[in-house]
Amino acid sequence: MIDKTAPLLDKHLLQRLGEAQHVTVLSGAGMSAESGIPTFRDAQTGIWAKYRAEDLATPEAFAANPARVWRWYEERRNAVRSARPHAGHQALVMLESLVPALSLLTQNVDGLHQLAGSNQVIELHGNILRSKCHITGRLIGADWLTDSTQEPPPSPYVAGGYARPDVVWFGEVLPQEALERAMAAAIRCDFCISVGTTSLVQPAASLPLMALEHGAALVEINPMETPLSMHAEQCLRGPASQVLASVVQQLADWKRDPGQGPRL
Ligand code: APR
């Protein structure tokens, strides 16, 4: 049953979603907000409202004070470890079974899509639960990290190297393979959903526009207006858990009986 209070996908967009061969979803921090992980730019509650990105999320900040950066990420890792996916993550798992091809691109580093059971997840900004050597970039196993009492633990690969989170900091380039796969998905898809992102951080913010330029229908899910809103064919204003669950239920109903309207 569709949640009567959730905004519904317009009929012609539901048909386009129902007929889509390839759907691409781009998620941002708002996707994880209802799992208890703070967003970055929301006023009051956003991470960058409390901390300065320059002090914590740049290679320069790590070089200046690796212990401070490591400890701050350790706090965030603990929050991520105790977070659980919500109904919106589950809806995206269901979406995978309803469409011929789904690409799930995420700016989130918390792994919640994978924890929910999504298979085709492309992590654009890395994963906070992984660590890598700050000099060689090689991944460092969890056993090595837990054996060390240093903050940050030394790198096993090179003298003078430290473990650092395997996330993309400001001023760094995105993992090339992930970005190439994401761009290919944006170009190839015929329906694109942007959910829970301010659409401010590049190059991720360009992916839905790339999809639009290549003929895809574009829908935004976000309680707030963003720079992407004016380009979207429909903006569904509400929280990701409720709106995604409702959109995917609409699609499931449409797949069962394309002639029917939503079952309210
Ligand atoms: N459901 C959907 N959207 C929500 C919800 C919710 N429950 N709660 C908040 N939002 C929206 C906000 O309105 C905002 O537009 O999520 C968005 C969060 O935006 P940001 O905090 O800017 O997150 P994001 O766009 O993912 O940031 C991109 O910036 O700091 C970097 O690397 C970091 O990946 C991050 C990147």
Image: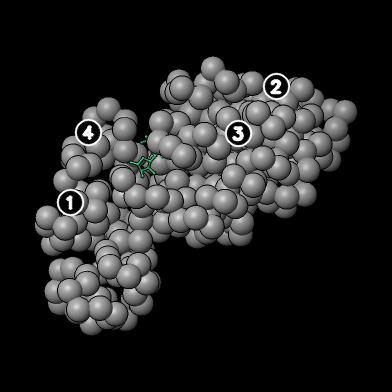
Question: How crowded is the residue under tag 2: few (<14 C-alpha within 10 Å), some, or many (20+)?
Answer: few
Q: Secondary structure at mark 3?
A: helix
Foreground mark, 2 or 3, reads 3
- Under mark 3, the amino acid is Met
Say which quarter of the image contains residue 162: bottom left
Q: Secondary structure at mark 2?
A: loop
The residue beneath circle 3 is: 210
Could you say where residue 106 lies in the image, as x and y percent from the top left? 50, 47
Q: Which residue does the numbered mark 4 point to in the structure image?
A: 49
Q: Nearer the viewer, mark 1 or mark 4?
A: 1
> Disc 4 to disc 3, how far (Cα)?
30 Å
Q: Are marks 2 and 3 in contact (CB under 8 Å)?
A: no
Picture quarter with ligand 1: top left
* Residue at position x 48%, y 34% in the image: 205
Q: How many marks?
A: 4
Determine which residue is flagged by label 1. Answer: 61
Q: Residues within 10 Å of mark 1 (few under 14, many from 20)?
A: some
For ligand 1, tell me if the residue under mark 4 lies within 8 Å.
no
